[in-house]
Amino acid sequence: MAVTVLKSPFVVLDEMDRIVGVGPGAESQFGPLVGSLIWDCFPGSEPLFKPYYDAARRSGAPLEFVQFYDGNVARIHAVPQSNGQLDLHWERLTHLDTMTLDGLVQTLDESLEVLDEEHVSARRSALRQNLRLIEGGT
């Protein structure tokens, strides 16, 4: 019996956000970009992603978020390393189909639904973290 293991694509950024490592699942897109500043390679992405990357580095804890960029909605896992590098893994959740108007409408609806679900889930998680059990009472 053969088992297929799906590897999520990953990229490693140095402390200056240069691409310094690329996993096999991202080689075709990111391999030629090794050594480049990620923000130069993906215009307009810095204000969308950098705050999360900086927060993960500051906290030293992995951080997960969902973001829309360039027609894709993806769940990104930013995992800080002790040397200042950041491992990025992602899973594409939806992609806008711009080939036909019907395809665009359908995939836009799907993308908005995914983003709404993620927003509700993130809000619920934040509320749970703020809840405190108060002992006592009658």
Image (cartoon, rainbow, N blue to C red):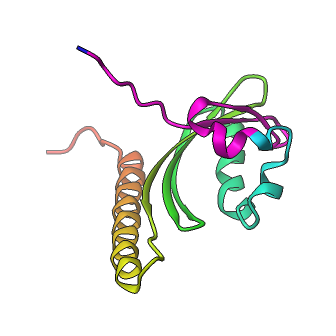
Q: Which residue is at the far top? A: 1
Identify the residue at horizontal 77%, vertical 42% (top origin): 32
Total count of labels: 0
**What percent of the width, then of the height, locates residue 91?**
47, 46
Residue located at (40% from left, 68% from top): 111
Q: Is residue 25 magenta?
A: yes
Image quarter of residue 106: bottom left
Residue nearer the viewer, 87 or 60: 87
Residue 102 in the image, given as x and y percentages of width and height = 34, 83
Rendered residue at 39%/59% (across/down): 118
Magenta-colored stretch includes residue 115: no
Q: Is residue 59 left or right of residue 114?
A: right
Which one is nearer the viewer's eye here, 2 or 68? 2
Compared with 36, 69 (above or below) is below
In the rendering, at what x and y percent does residue 9 appear?
Answer: 55, 37
Q: Nearer the viewer, residue 42 or 117?
A: 42
Stretch in magenta: 2-31
Quadrant holding the N terminus: top left
Which residue lies most toward the left here?
138
Please tell me whether residue 108 is drawn above or below residue 64 in the rendered image.
below
Quarter of the image that includes the C terminus? top left
- Residue 33, image x, y percentages: 79, 44
Name the residue nearer the viewer: 73 or 133.
73
96 relative position to 21: left or right: left
- Residue at 37% x, 77% y: name it: 103
